[in-house]
């Protein structure tokens, strides 16, 4: 079972997400929080696999909470709307593994939780180009495990093979591994193998930062 904590200041949203998540059969909601500090306390007490974190909450926001959870093994998925872009950029800096729109379909919510539990960064197709491109424009390169202070040299697209560039470009468009495989007429396992080799070569933590690299390096415009 994937153990989940839901953090949102609106009880109706917490309840809705909880019902949807637990309908999957392999997800258990073990706690709900109405503020950032409460979310941090629950995560440190219950050690869930994933926390769905609202960005803006009273009595402590999700951005601060996300930063405070970097030393845990819990994957943070930011639940956001387009009008909170500045908070999203900060959450990416703070170590969030993905983003989900509050109006996402039930299947997207469930898949986001599963992907985060697998250790995969997740950026939905609706969020990818706007968030990643704007983040890349305004933020320094996020080096793996680093401070994001911009002192790390950014590798260019030439360090990747033609096939690798095709895969990263598709990823930056918001495609899943299965969709990338279908587009390029290759196996899903081949896509995963390429991505596993690409990330450490570029010095990025996950799929989210790989998308950011694609924009900052000029591979995707």
Image (spheres, rainbow, N blue to C red):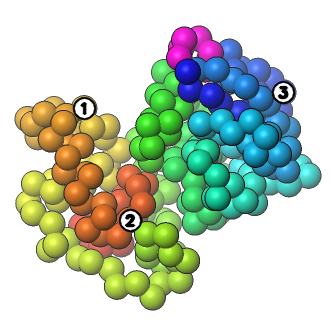
Q: Disc 1 marks which residue?
A: 178
Which comes sooner in the sequence, label 3 or label 2?
3
Split into 4 quadrants, where in the image is the N terminus?
top right
Q: Disc 3 marks which residue?
A: 11
Residue name at image x 71 percent, y 33 percent: 5
Crowding at dot 3, Cα within 10 Å, few <14 / some 14-19 / many 20+, comes out as few
Q: How far is disc 1 from disc 3 in space, using C-alphas?
A: 35 Å
**Residue 184 at x, y = what percent?**
11, 40
Q: Disc 2 marks which residue?
A: 204
Q: Is residue 184 magenta?
A: no
Q: Nearer the viewer, residue 97 or 103?
A: 97
**Residue 133 at x, y = what percent?**
42, 63
Give left or right: position of 38 versus 25: right
Which comes sooner in the sequence, label 1 or label 2?
1
Q: Residue furthest bottom?
A: 151
Q: Are marks 3 and 2 in contact (CB under 8 Å)?
A: no
**Residue 49 at x, y = what percent?**
59, 36
Task: Give the residues in magenta.
Answer: 21-26
Q: Is residue 134 visible?
A: yes
């Amino acid at each position: 079972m994937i153990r989940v904590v839901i953090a949102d200041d609106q009880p109706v949203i917490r309840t809705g997400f909880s019902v949807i998540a637990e309908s999957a059969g392999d997800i258990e909601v073990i706690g709900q929080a109405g503020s950032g500090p409460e979310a941090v306390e629950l995560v440190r007490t219950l050690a869930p696999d994933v926390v769905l974190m609202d960005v803006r909450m009273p009595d402590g926001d999700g951005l601060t909470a996300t930063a405070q959870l970097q030393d845990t093994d819990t994957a943070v998925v930011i639940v956001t709307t387009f009008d909170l872009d500045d908070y999203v950029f900060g959450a990416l800096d703070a170590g969030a593994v993905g983003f989900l729109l509050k109006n996402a379909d039930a299947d997207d919510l469930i898949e986001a939780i599963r992907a985060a539990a697998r250790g995969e960064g997740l950026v939905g197709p609706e969020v990818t180009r706007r968030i990643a491109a704007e983040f890349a424009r305004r933020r320094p390169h996020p080096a793996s495990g680093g401070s994001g202070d911009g002192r790390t040299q950014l590798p260019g697209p030439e360090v990747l093979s033609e096939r690798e560039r095709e895969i990263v470009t598709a990823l930056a468009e918001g495609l899943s591994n299965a969709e990338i495989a279908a587009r390029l007429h290759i196996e899903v396992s081949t896509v995963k193998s390429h991505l596993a080799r690409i990330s450490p070569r570029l010095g990025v933590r996950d799929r989210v930062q790989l998308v950011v690299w694609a924009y900052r390096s000029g591979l995707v415009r």
